[in-house]
Image: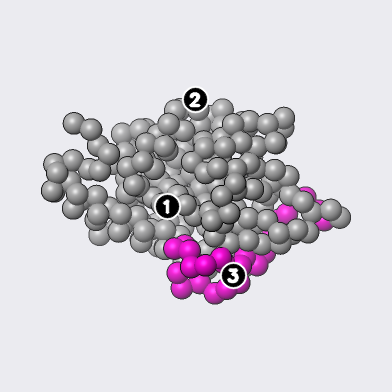
Amino acid sequence: MAPSLAILDYGMGNLRSAAKALEHVGAQIEVTSDHERVRGADGVVLPGVGAFPKAMEAVRSLELDALLHERRDAGVPIIGLCLGMQLLFESTTELGGAAGVGLLRGTVEALDSPGLKVPQIGWNAVSWRGEPALAEGLPDPCAFYHVHSFAARPTDHEDIAATATYGAEFVSVVERGRVYGTQFHPEKSGPDGLALLSNFAALCATGAGERSAARSLTGRAPNETS
């Protein structure tokens, strides 16, 4: 069965291109900010373009930050794309600073790229660390399309699933439990980007099966109160 994915709509993000890419790999997509519809999805996608502080204002106004924590605690896979990945962290220094969603520990700071044009716009080779779930079947290194001026600096180095270099090394993919993030745009990264999104959809389908089995045994999903 195709997994159902909720793409969070908070007014900032490449919603259409992300939706089309995920539909292409077989997922059922709903673009929404409705909490109950998000709760019914097998996975959650947090997209984003623009400035971190403004994006977090919109996320908080819709109480999506609390919803993301709830979905994480329920074992639902979550992926942040580009700015969406940055928002998963605790804070940023951009435009004077702002607090993030806080699913991942660390900050988001300006790229360390002296002498290079910022933002970085274009393809960049990503090198995997270990065997992250999102990298299944992908080459190492693997090129993806990046557009960004800031990058995450995770406190927990084990959360780093891949890095790239633009002047200096930066974190390009993160993975902690069932929380994932890509600094690049997989929906704009050709066949390899689609393969990565397909891997995420497969993780969501697996998680849906596990939650369904738990519900059949207990009468409710894990972390679901009566």
Q: Decide which of tag 3 and tag 2 comes sooner along the chain.
A: 2
Q: Residues within 10 Å of mark 1 (few under 14, many from 20)?
A: few
**Magenta part of the chain:** 116-141
Query: Disc 2 on helix, strand or loop?
Result: helix
How far across and down, in percent of the image, does residue 28 sit? 33, 52
Which label sits on residue 142? 3
Horizontal side, residue 120 vs residue 152: left or right? right
Which label sits on residue 61? 2
**Above or below for 202 versus 14:** below
**Above or below for 129 versus 224:** below
Query: Disc 1 on helix, strand or loop?
Result: loop
Which amino acid lies under the numbered mark 2 shown in the image of this protein? Ser
Which amino acid lies under the numbered mark 3 shown in the image of this protein? Cys
Q: Decide which of tag 3 and tag 1 comes sooner along the chain.
A: 3
How far across and down, in percent of the image, does residue 101 sit? 51, 36
Which residue was labeled with disc 1?
Answer: 177
How far across and down, in percent of the image, does residue 53 sit? 63, 32
Cα gap from disc 3 to disc 1, whole angstroms: 23 Å
Cα gap from disc 3 to disc 2, whole angstroms: 37 Å
> Which of these two is toward me, 85 or 10?
85
- The answer to if 120 sits in the magenta stretch is yes
User: Marks 2 and 1: which is nearer the front?
Assistant: 1
Q: Residues within 10 Å of mark 3 (few under 14, many from 20)?
A: some
**Is there CB contact under 8 Å for labels 2 and 1?**
no
Q: Decide which of tag 2 and tag 1 comes sooner along the chain.
A: 2
Horizontal side, residue 112 vs residue 197: left or right? right
Which amino acid lies under the numbered mark 1 shown in the image of this protein? Gly
